[in-house]
Image (tube, rainbow, N blue to C red):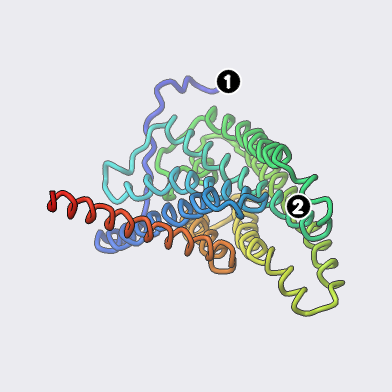
Amino acid sequence: MYPNRSNRANFRILGFPGPPSLQYILFFLLLITYLLTLLSNSVIITITLKERRLHTPMYFYLRNLSFLEICYVSVTVPKILSTITSHGRYISFYGCMTQCLVFFFLGSTECLLFGIMAYDRYLAICKPLHYTTMMNANMCWGLCFCAIIGGFATTFPPIFLVSRMPFCGYEINHFFCDSPPILHLCCVDTFLIRMINFCSASFVTMTSLSVTLISYVYIITTILKIPTTTGRKKTFSTCFSHLIVVSIYYSTVIFMYVRPGLSFSFSLNRVLGVFYTVITPILNPLIYCLRNKDVKEAIKNQFLKQSFRQVLQKTQSNSIVCSIKKE
């Protein structure tokens, strides 16, 4: 049995290395990136809700992905920004475990959602006649609910086991509470927990990746059968953005977590940590918006509607003022 953990000390996050001037520059860049991530994903959620023509399963999943991205960055980035101060580097033991749990839960859910989005594209391209009946509202909500359950079921057990371990140190060599640097502080052999982490990450990643790869094999086969080049390009453009996003996501996550050991450089871990916690969430809405004509047109329409409303309100207010003056 491990000793009593009721009086666990606070963890200290080492944060950014280097002089204060460099840390302030990094703080500013991360803050701007964080705000842009919140803004861009919020725009996608708003646009896909307001535009009726975007009320389709593909944009339903995209809206859920944007919501997950907002939660994902909000779990880590504010704490990362606070590490620029000496007081902000400290986090309670249970706060650290909670951050770690929510971070991996959202990441696992997002990973499973990518597989669902690939399956959605498969149905839309390979089975267009049955798409609307197979991918109805109940199916969309049911698949999202399964992703949430799967994300929690594969995340909670290993994080719970980590929280029960004794620690010989409390300085986390990272920007936030991540599993590998926390396990590095344990006083006992962590082989079992590392293997459970490896199996959980492998199950989530490989399940989603397998569904994605199989879906795209069928999608590419179907596209190659289209007789015209224009038709092939138009069909492939509907899933190309998703393919770019999942390629970036899977390559980073597999390199970070789907391996059975801790034989990695913490410096490299920090660089990758910034990439998949800060950079990737802002790339997703940019990629989907820049390559998606429907989203770009919807944004323009909403902007024009808003501008027209403002002009109309000003005109009405001016007419009221003029009528009052005449009286």
Q: Mark 1 or mark 2, which has the lower sequence index?
A: 1
- Tell me the CA gap for discs 1 and 2: 46 Å
Secondary element at tag 1? loop
| Residue visible at 79% across and 51% down in the picture | 131
| Residue visible at 72% across and 74% down in the picture | 233
Q: Mark 1 and mark 2 in contact? Answer it, CB < 8 Å.
A: no
Residue 276, position in %: x, y?
52, 56
Residue 237, position in %: x, y?
68, 69
Q: Residues within 10 Å of mark 1 (few under 14, many from 20)?
A: few
Q: Which mark is residue 1?
A: 1
Q: How many marks?
A: 2
Q: Quadrant of residue 146?
A: top right
- Is residue 209 among what the camera can see? yes
Q: Of the residues shown, which amino acid type is indicated by label 1?
A: Met
Q: Which residue is mark 2?
A: 119
Between circles 1 and 2, the one closer to the viewer is 2
Secondary element at tag 2? helix
Q: Quadrant of residue 193?
A: top right
Q: Of the residues shown, which amino acid type is indicated by label 2?
A: Tyr
- Judged left or right of residue 79, residue 323 is left
| Of the pair 228 and 2, the residue shown nearer to us | 228
- Judged left or right of residue 143, residue 54 is left
